[in-house]
């Protein structure tokens, strides 16, 4: 354990991390609840999806950059800087006068949010020994589960009784208190060295990833726009790789990301993220449309996913002691496809309980995979690379979610078109 860990009040630092994480975690659900009222007042329904996309694009793109900056300048200044940007975006979102301005301010909010998850997870890796992190990460998992439940309720209450602006302004006291607490309780020793920031690499990486994510999310755009975005993604990506090979402090260290443990952990996280977003999207539709059950039952089957994930994280420290950390990762990697098998054998006559069981095992497996991957990756590198390594896992999960949503959307559209074509052909035959 580092000297900084001994000097920091670890309990209060973790409490502050949970406080700051809740601020970002609740953002998606609380804003979604308020959006009908916001659109009703500001108009501009065509920008509806971009209120969410702008935030996620900025957050996903900057995750890796903030991870590297925390390795250079230390965790505390980068985290506090990210929170300040997030709070500025929150303040301006509440003052938005049109949907276009709201989208721009949500982009600013996302630029700040990109620092919070990777840097806080890195701080936990700095302060706690390997065998202690499971318990701490279990507490963090409860934050995400709680925000999923509290967000819609809080959003409805605020919109109905105060003003939609307060779904953004509520972040201000939380963020300010978090900054004060981090300044007081988080101690770290950073070796001050003359570091040259890779500005060109940061710009090229951002251009490439934004082009990729926009291409994946805006699949209904015209062919020439999609081809143009693909060309930008490839060209900027190649230029970025060339820049990283010669930069003294690259944003993405190719040797680091190429390490077997980090590469396999990122690949597993990306694939699991793809499958998980697919489950979240398709399972409620299947339960209602194919099994013919109510929205409440459909919600129950998906809730089992939310139950399984934090439960696995909370029990992970016991798994570490019983099986070892690498075997725990293997257990998660087996439970995830085991749960998927439940869903593969669903038929129109199946019980929703079968879908719920599959959802639970997939969530439990993903909980073990996500936590164990981060713990293993953090333990495999020294302090000066831990921020970058942690950010790589979080970035892989975000990219997997985006890819999964795109692939699933393509499959669903193909299936609907095929079904519609078959129905049309059958109708012509009957005539």
Image (cartoon, rainbow, N blue to C red):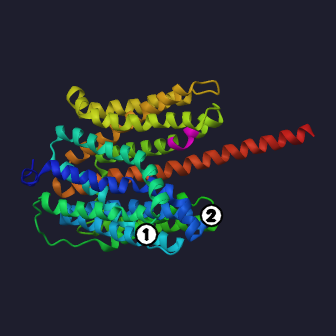
Q: Which residue is pictured at 58% across the width and 38% down the height?
A: 295
* Residue 353 on the magenta segment: no
Q: Position of residue 21 (x, y in %)?
A: 31, 54
Q: Residue furthest right?
A: 431
Looking at the rendered structure, the number of numbered marks drawn on it comes to 2
Quadrant of the rendered structure where residue 328 is? Answer: top left
Q: Which residue is pictured at 16% across the width and 51% down the height?
A: 12
Q: Position of residue 310 (x, y in %)?
A: 34, 38
Magenta: main secondary structure equals helix
Indicate whether 230 appears above or below 306: below
Q: Is residue 207 left or right of residue 74?
A: right
Disc 2: which residue = 221
Q: Which mark is residue 11?
A: none
Indicate whether 429 appears above or below 339: below
Is residue 60 shown to the viewer in this render?
yes
Indicate whether 107 appears above or below 393: below
* Residue 282 on the magenta segment: yes
| Foreground pick, 326 / 10 | 10
Number of other residues with Cα within 10 Å of mark 1, as a class: few under 14, some 14 to 19, many 20 or more? some
Is residue 256 shown to the viewer in this render?
no
Residue range highlighted in magenta: 280-284
Disc 1: which residue = 94
Q: Position of residue 23 (x, y in %)?
A: 34, 56
Q: Is residue 225 left or right of residue 131?
A: right
Answer with mark 1 or mark 2, whichever residue precedes in sequence.
1
Label 2 near label 1: C-beta < 8 Å?
A: no
Q: Position of residue 431 (x, y in %)?
A: 93, 40
Number of other residues with Cα within 10 Å of mark 2, as a class: few under 14, some 14 to 19, many 20 or more? few
């Amino acid at each position: 354990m580092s000297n900084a860990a001994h000097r920091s009040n670890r309990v209060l630092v973790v409490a502050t991390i949970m406080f700051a994480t809740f601020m970002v975690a609740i953002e998606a659900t609380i804003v979604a609840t308020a959006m009908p009222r916001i659109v009703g007042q500001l108009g501009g329904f065509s920008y509806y999806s971009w209120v969410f996309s702008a935030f996620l694009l900025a957050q996903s793109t900057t995750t890796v950059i903030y991870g590297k900056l925390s390795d250079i300048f230390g965790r505390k200044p980068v985290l506090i800087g990210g929170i300040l940007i997030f709070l500025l975006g929150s303040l301006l979102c509440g003052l938005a006068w049109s949907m276009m301005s709201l989208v721009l301010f949500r982009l600013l909010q996302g630029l700040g949010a990109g620092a919070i998850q990777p840097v806080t997870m890195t701080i936990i890796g700095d302060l706690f020994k390997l065998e202690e992190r499971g318990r701490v990460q279990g507490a963090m998992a409860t934050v995400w589960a709680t925000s999923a439940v509290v967000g819609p309720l809080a959003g409805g209450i605020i919109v109905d009784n105060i003003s939609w602006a307060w779904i953004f302004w509520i972040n201000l006291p939380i963020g300010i208190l978090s900054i004060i607490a981090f300044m007081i309780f988080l101690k770290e020793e950073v070796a001050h060295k003359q570091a040259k920031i890779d500005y060109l690499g940061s710009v090229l990486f951002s251009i490439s990833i934004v082009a990729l994510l926009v291409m994946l999310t805006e699949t209904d755009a015209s062919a020439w726009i999609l081809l143009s975005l693909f060309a930008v993604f490839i060209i900027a990506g190649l230029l970025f790789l060339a820049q990283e090979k010669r930069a003294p402090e690259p944003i993405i260290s190719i040797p680091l990301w190429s390490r077997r443990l980090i590469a396999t952990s990122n690949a597993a996280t990306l694939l699991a993220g793809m499958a998980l977003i697919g489950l979240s999207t398709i399972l409620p539709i299947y339960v209602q449309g194919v099994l013919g059950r109510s929205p409440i039952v459909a919600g129950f089957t998906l809730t089992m996913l939310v139950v399984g994930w934090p439960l696995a994280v909370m029990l992970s420290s016991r798994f570490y002691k019983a099986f070892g950390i690498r075997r725990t990762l293997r257990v998660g990697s087996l439970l995830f496809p085991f749960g998927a098998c439940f869903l593969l054998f669903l038929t129109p006559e199946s019980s929703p309980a079968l879908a719920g069981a599959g959802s639970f095992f997939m969530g439990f497996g993903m909980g073990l995979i996500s936590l164990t991957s981060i713990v293993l990756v953090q333990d495999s590198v020294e302090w000066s690379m831990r921020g970058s390594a942690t950010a790589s896992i979080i970035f892989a999960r975000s990219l997997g979610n985006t890819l999964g949503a795109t692939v699933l959307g393509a499959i669903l559209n193909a299936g609907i078109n095929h079904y519609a074509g078959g129905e049309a052909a059958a109708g012509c035959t009957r005539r």
